[in-house]
Image (cartoon, rainbow, N blue to C red):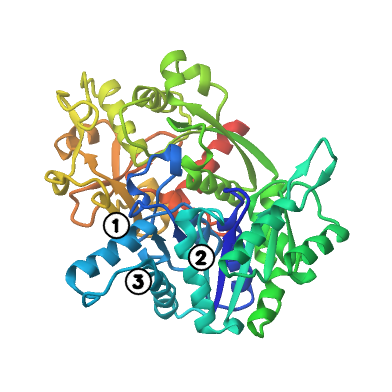
Amino acid sequence: MKYIFLTGGVVSSLGKGLTAASLGTLLEARGLKVALQKFDPYLNVDPGTMSPFQHGEVYVLDDGAETDLDLGHYERFTHSELTQFNNLTSGRVYLTVLEKERRGDYLGKTVQVIPHVTDEIKKRVTELGEQSGADVVITEIGGTTGDIEGLPFLEAIREFALECGRDNAVFVHVTYVPYIKAAGELKTKPTQQSVAKLREIGIAPDILICRTEKPIDDEMRKKISLFCNVPLAGVIEEIDVDHSIYEVPLMLQREKMDELVCQELGLETSPADMSAWEVVIKRIIQPKHKVRIGVIGKYIDLQDAYKSVYEAVTHAGGANDCAVEVVRVDSEDIERDGAVTHLGELSGVLVPGGFGERGIEGKILAAQYARENNVPYLGLCLGMQIACIEFARNVLGLEGAHSAEFAPKTPHPIIALLDEQQNVTEMGGTMRLGAQACRLKSGSKAAELYGVEEITERHRHRYEFNNAYREHFEAENFVFSGTSPNGNLVELVELKGHPYYMATQAHPEFKSKPVQAHPLFAGFIKAALHLADGN
């Protein structure tokens, strides 16, 4: 088994997750099986209860694990099958250690960071390797080198590399080389300081990934190599991409990073064949068509709050040889100004998931606008619930129709709490989570798009369509095109006679890839393109 550990220094948000995923792409293209995992230093057990303002989206896996959004990169870029073992937080580590201490597993010993906490971290690296059967395990350490909460993870990987043998482990450090405009030059000192801090901890990086806005010339590479004690070939330029994050694997391939990693680990493979990836990139960068769609949300200023949605839209654009301009619309602005003001020039309306009452009425207005004006609509999770509420109010005439989540005393609870959620008191990890089966209605648009009779999609919700209203909806051409296998839960809805009015209780954005766009998104962009072209 071979191991790659990615750390980061200077500042956060350097793209460690993207770099790890891109390296995974290249190694898979060399015929290797890759497993990826993320270690997060924060004390939350998982990100399930964290605010989008602080953390971005919560990424849900098939097994129901609520994880860091970087795992979305891992799944989109590779074929790695992710589970709860692919994400570990300090909170989870300490919780496990303390549970063992309470049970007496440590036989009365003094419980310490070293070895008990570090052993638990190392165990997760070993377990992933064994369970995945991978040739290479890539482990990303979240946070920034020097942060106090990250020290146990750094110590753990130092110990792990020593124990498995340095021929079997590679340390990759992602760092920042800033461009000082006033001086007109790049500066290497932050990188030098970052590497120095890492070496103080006992880790000497084998490869440096230099994030930068400007190209790094040969002289600067030599300087970084000399002062950071990294071979010249190990100084890798990772410049800001021009168009898409999916260019990063090709950039790292040009820098020969995958070749260097294989040399360091003694892996004999064929060169990476990235031809299929290059086709995807060409469609994204040089599309034949263009379309504008609106994403209607309440965290719209936060790029990471709807990260997987934006990526799925990009994939769908590539599948349709179409550039997609995403117009981010705050639902509260629609409440203030009306739907036409913000949506009138768009060819598609997408309402993603979310929680809380703020901005709900604006989302309802957006759904109404799309329905009444034959504008393609795609609703995800809350977006499906919104479509149902809007239809109940404005087509069925059910005054005051709402979700029991936002209006507990509504006379028409179109959306109600799931039976299994009635007595739930703890917030973390208690929703309907993970992959759930769905049976598609024959002859429906959903069945046409998926091309199969039964599917699985990932879920993250507590509320569901109220079955007491099903017949009322169906009488007005509202189609329940996907249900749980027993028929009790509504999973997909659509509107008969509308060019594209689809909504799902699930989060299909989590299963979209650049080389395999999700059918609901691909169909949505196709319909939006038809509207934009006047077809």
Q: Is residue 472 left or right of residue 139?
A: left
Q: In terms of sequence position, does the residue under pointer 2 or pointer 1 come before the other?
A: 2
Residue at the spot x=59%, y=69% of the render?
203
Q: In terms of sequence position, does the residue under pointer 3 or pointer 1 come before the other?
A: 3
286 vs 79: above or below: above
Residue 382 drawn at (x, y percent): 34, 37
Q: Is residue 34 left or right of residue 412?
A: right
Identity, as a three-letter code, of the amino acid under mark 3: His
359 vs 124: above or below: above
Residue 205 seen in render: yes
Q: CA distance from mark 2 to mark 1?
A: 37 Å
Q: Residues within 10 Å of mark 1 (few under 14, many from 20)?
A: some
The residue identified by callout 1 is 436
Q: Secondary structure at mark 3?
A: helix
The residue identified by callout 3 is 116
The residue identified by callout 2 is 154
Q: Secondary structure at mark 2?
A: helix
Q: Which mark is residue 204?
A: none
Pick out the residue farthest to the right. Answer: 219
Q: Residues within 10 Å of mark 3 (few under 14, many from 20)?
A: some
Q: Residues within 10 Å of mark 2 (few under 14, many from 20)?
A: many
